[in-house]
Image (spheres, rainbow, N blue to C red):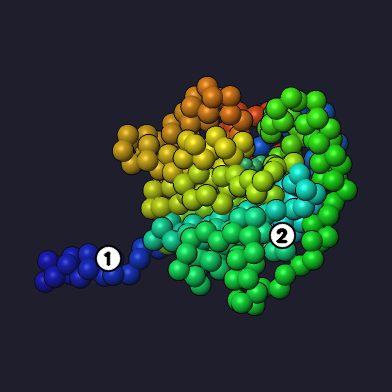
Amino acid sequence: MKTSFILLFILSSSIFPQQTNKFLFVIHGGAGTITKGSITAVEEQSYKEKLKEALFAGYEILKNNGSSLDAVEAAIKIMEDSPLFNAGKGAVFNNKGKNELDASIMDGRNLNAGAIAGVHHIKNPISLARLVMEKSQHVLLTGDGAEEFASANGIQLVPEDYFYTEKRWQQLLKAREGDKKDSIPKINYINSDYKFGTVGAVALDKHGNLAAGTSTGGMTNKKFGRVGDSPIIGAGTYADSICAVSCTGHGEYFIKNAVAYDVSARMKYCGHSLVQATEDIIHNVLEKQGAKGGLIAIDKDGNLAMPFNTTGMYRGYIKENGSWEVKIYGE
Ligand code: ASP
């Protein structure tokens, strides 16, 4: 009798996923040259309020039994709709004076992933990335094709001037000037004219599922259809059953070092803790290559890490008990 009861318990818990009640949500709004003097007190307040809004949007979903994917998408949409961040509405301009958007999302339950790159008319790139994941047989769609897919699936395209903001335009003009001074023009991530502000989110839901998403306008003055790490699964975004990661920084280095996947690989193959893995990648591997940036990450046990090697990173977390924090500088 006792044995059959135990057997039944084991069977039912493997058929019905465990509800752990543990959940966690972490977001970022980009890493870069962010110091007390580089933004005004009013700007600082606006950033903090928007981060808080995005954080609580995800929290409400997770608290009410929602999925990690829904939390990630909801929070990123809020930041995409704000002109403050380099994603959606506040995206930077490329060398041709256009806004060219990249995004990706990944479901840690089953490694499903969706991404888009180089789109010009998509208000919420993260939602299109999710649609690619859920309604196409592909992982990454680019440019016109991605927009055709959006239209075919009922997503309304917005005119290009929706993305115009004076602040980003001035940054482009400045960056173009800087380029003229270099004999070989190159993107210098440390130069604040190239601006930060990519957004990302990682979530662990009550069912124990992890998800990650990232959205960006890329780097100011980017040329020749340049695509960074944000829409590259394993570089800017990754989620599996071990951890969920979203990166921000000089994308080329994040691609070359497969940063987001490396966090999971180190945990899986080397037995690193989440903090050990992420700190080593940001402060050792990337730093040695002169690469600037940061990441947010959580693991299946509810640990979190938010390392960066720039002066600041817009970031925040909220735990299941409602305790939360948003930070900007390197405190
Ligand atoms: N990683 C982004 C890119 O390289 C930029 C950023 O995060 O600031 O496109």
Residue type, label 1: Ser
* Viewer-nearest residue: 239 or 61: 239
Quarter residue 173 falls in: top right
- Which one is in front, 100 or 60? 100
| Quarter the C terminus occupies | top right
Question: Outermost residue toward the front?
Answer: 183
Q: Is residue 7 left or right of residue 149?
A: left
For the residues carrying marks 1 and 2, which lies nearer the camera in this image?
Answer: 2
Say left or right for 237 vs 30. Answer: left
Observer able to see residue 205:
no
Assess disc 1: are there few (<14), some (14-19) or many (≥20) residues with their C-alpha within 10 Å of its C-alpha. Answer: few
Q: Nearer the viewer, residue 283 or 75?
A: 283
Task: Please name the residue shown 78% across and 48% down the image.
Answer: 96
| Labelled pair 1, 2 in contact (Cβ < 8 Å) | no
The residue drawn where x is 88% and y is 48% is 166
| Residue 156 horizontal side relative to residue 296, left or right | right
Q: Position of residue 234 (x, y in %)?
A: 46, 47
Lower sequence index among marks 1 and 2: 1
Identified by mark 2, the residue type is: His
Which element is circle 1 on?
A: helix
Q: Is residue 130 visible?
A: yes
Residue named by callout 2? 120
Asked which secondary structure carries label 2, the reply is loop
Residue beneath disc 1: 14
Residue 243 position in % (x across, y down): 43, 47
Tell which residue pokes out farthest to the top in this image.
288
* Residue located at (48% from left, 27% from top): 285
Task: Give the answer, above or below, for where 99 lies relative to 122.
Answer: above
